[in-house]
Image (cartoon, rainbow, N blue to C red):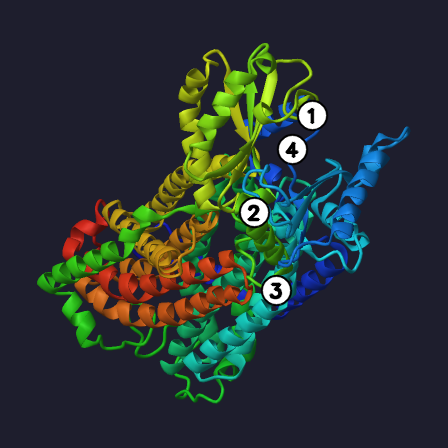
Amino acid sequence: MSQRGDALPPPGLRQSLARIVVWLRWPVVAFWVLAAVALTGFAPTSQTAGTGLDALLPEDSRAAAAEARSYEQFDLPLLSRLAVVQRDPGGLDAEQVATTVAAAARLDAQRLQEGFEPEKNDLLAALPLVNATTALPTSTGDGTTAITYLFGSPQATAGAQTRAAESYAERLGPGADVVGVTGPIAAQREQGRVISDRLPWVEIGTVTFVLLVVGIAFRSVLAPLVTVGTALLAYLVSVRFLGLVGTVIDVAVPQQLEPLILALLVGVVADYSIFYLYAARDRLRGGLGPRAAALGSTASYSSVILAAGLTVAAGTASLMVARLPLYSSFGPGLALTVLTGLVISLTLIPALMAIFGRGLFWPSRFPATVGTPGRTGHGVSASGLPPKPPGALVRALTRRPVAVLAVVLCVGGLAFAAAPVRDLRLDLSFTGGLPADNPVSLAQEAAAQGFAPGIVSPTVLVVDEPGVTDDRRALTRLQDEVEQVPGVSGVVGPGEVASDQALGVLLSRSGDAARLLLVLDSDPLSATSVDVVEDLQERLPGMLSAAGLPQGSATVTGDSAVAAELVGATAEDFLRIALAASLVLLALLVVVLRALVAPLFLLASSLLSVAAALGISTWVFQDLLGRDGLTFYVPFATTVLSLALGSDYNVFSVGRIWDVAKDKSLREAVREVTPRTNAAIRTAGIALAGSLALVALVPLWPFQEIALTMAVGLMLDVFVVRSFLVPALITAFGPVSRWPGRRRSQQPA
């Protein structure tokens, strides 16, 4: 036996491992069933990463530090992330307005009582505003709307604060014209509820779709059941195993991405099952017996699937280098989930193939057995499969002039589709992601009609300078400067408030700090508000000088400032993670393929298809549907996953070509392997794309964006990159693509 030129296990080891799995087929099935039962009964579910705004920011956040200083310097907080909205287009009843003010006064009085313990109360204070006068900036002055800011205890969870706010709203009475509770905290809790309600539908839809795709591809009844059963068992085991590991190390899964994890794991396990099933069916068609077919498929494909799975896990694990905790804690959890699914796929699927044999593909019929276990059998090609003549398209792509033309057309088309990425904007709006008829969305819309969209969560500008509270004229000039910033709808400052009223609220008692309350004319967490805050931060040094406060410093805080900082950090992390993932995936491709040139153009083609998918999503959601931007974590998550999955298919397809090219010319290898790997990859890609597309059953903008981006990206990868671009690139580069590897001379079997 000659030396192998790849990084996969040698044939002897592959055969030995395959024999072990096939021989222990019944114990393997029993082990995984018992493991699932045991983990379900005793292991906790996976931890959910914090999703509050404070949990999303890095520890050195300037906005969070400014917010903390504001609490220390002033008596009353102005930053509220919960609000009760009342509205009557005909005008609020005066008695009801009095009831609203009295309810807030009772809550404040309770806080001032002796023996009050903040840690035992979910709400600490309330501040009602009514748009009955135009003295308040952005107020319509028609008395139709009231908004009561609620300030929660730092020790209370988001759920506890929201429930307390809902109880507060109910106590206002049935005739209080309460529209609902809104604000970032309420919106995040509502998103969690929507996800939990729709997750079962995502599960049902994903399972049904995979059953249909696999059933149609193999014209079988049992094959899709084995595929889905393995995928669901992998999901059950991985979630519980992740929960068990999470008690030891810091591993968590953001609640926003739980449906994506489900669809991804089911789709990936279905991919590996489809690869095995194609190999086993082809061997049965070639005349091998059931056990020999299972053994040959396991020996030939397990190493390729192992390399592919490790590629996906390594790509997702690269999230650990992120600066933001949302991503850095998610990376290990996702990698462990993929690895668990990989181990189950490598053992359980071969065991089930050996157990069910030909029955796995019933009602399909196969020729009489001509091979024995451990032999390749009659009519089996160098790739380990029955020979299949290439189609005209594959033959054409192995001619260099045609290949070069195909490369130019594919690259040009993908680059054109990727062009809108230049206009991609990141959006953080939790309320904007909810359906328009959701109570939280309705409450925010009502507040915007009576005041301005930014009234739900105003922005605070804190000015620090010794003795600044004594210079009211300078503060008034600064307020005038801020009001001129585009996107700022109104400003409340100490220049227009009596000194006794401003003290402790807008002016610190120490005399060294003052603050302005800004109301923006857009959703506080939207991409537009982020642009406004960034513009304001750039102008602040000049504004302070113009106002006569050249020695002062100013910091912007509030939800819009948090969003701006989070978007900026996400952009930095995006570049960092994209680079890390690319390097990791490139290194794995180099190791697996034992080449330097091919991994470079394979990775470049994957990057191009990812960019094209993001470009199409940007065009659909921003240009066509008019949304403010894509949810901030969507480009991040979809890029990493798409790159990893693209490399997964690279290993499967090009790895098989490299295998055959050891005994044949590269052109012959492409012609022999491409038709078979493309058939398997297309089926697997459709199953995975459909699984990920079904996360759109969750009626939230982020999941619609993820569904479209991932589904389009996979379809481009499968039907453009894998079917046309990769074979054309291998042909165009020729033997150079395998450099520095050497072609092995053909030897007799």
CB under 8 Å between discs 3 and 2 = no
Q: Residues within 10 Å of mark 2 (few under 14, many from 20)?
A: some
> SS for tag 4?
loop
Q: Identify which amino acid the numbered label 4 is placed on.
A: Leu
**Along the polypeptide, which appears first: circle 4 or circle 1?**
4
The answer to which quarter of the image holds residue 275 is bottom left
Closest to the observer, 375 or 493: 493
Q: Which residue carries the number 1 mark?
A: 501
> SS for tag 3?
helix
Q: Position of residue 204 (x, y in %)?
A: 59, 72
Q: Which residue carries the number 3 mark?
A: 199
CB under 8 Å between discs 3 and 4 = no
> Which of pointers 4 and 2 indicates the residue nearer the eye?
2
For the residues labelled 3 and 4, the Cα–Cα distance comes to: 37 Å
Q: Residues within 10 Å of mark 1 (few under 14, many from 20)?
A: few
Q: Which residue carries the number 4 mark?
A: 78
> SS for tag 2?
loop
Q: Residues within 10 Å of mark 3 (few under 14, many from 20)?
A: some
**Along the polypeptide, which appears first: circle 1 or circle 2?**
2
Closest to the observer, 743 or 339: 339
> Which of pointers 3 and 2 indicates the residue nearer the eye?
2
For the residues labelled 4 and 2, the Cα–Cα distance comes to: 21 Å
Q: Residues within 10 Å of mark 4 (few under 14, many from 20)?
A: many
The answer to which quarter of the image holds residue 170 is bottom right
Disc sitting over residue 140 in the figure: 2
For the residues labelled 1 and 2, the Cα–Cα distance comes to: 23 Å
Q: Is residue 192 left or right of residue 38?
A: left
Q: Identify which amino acid the numbered label 3 is placed on.
A: Leu
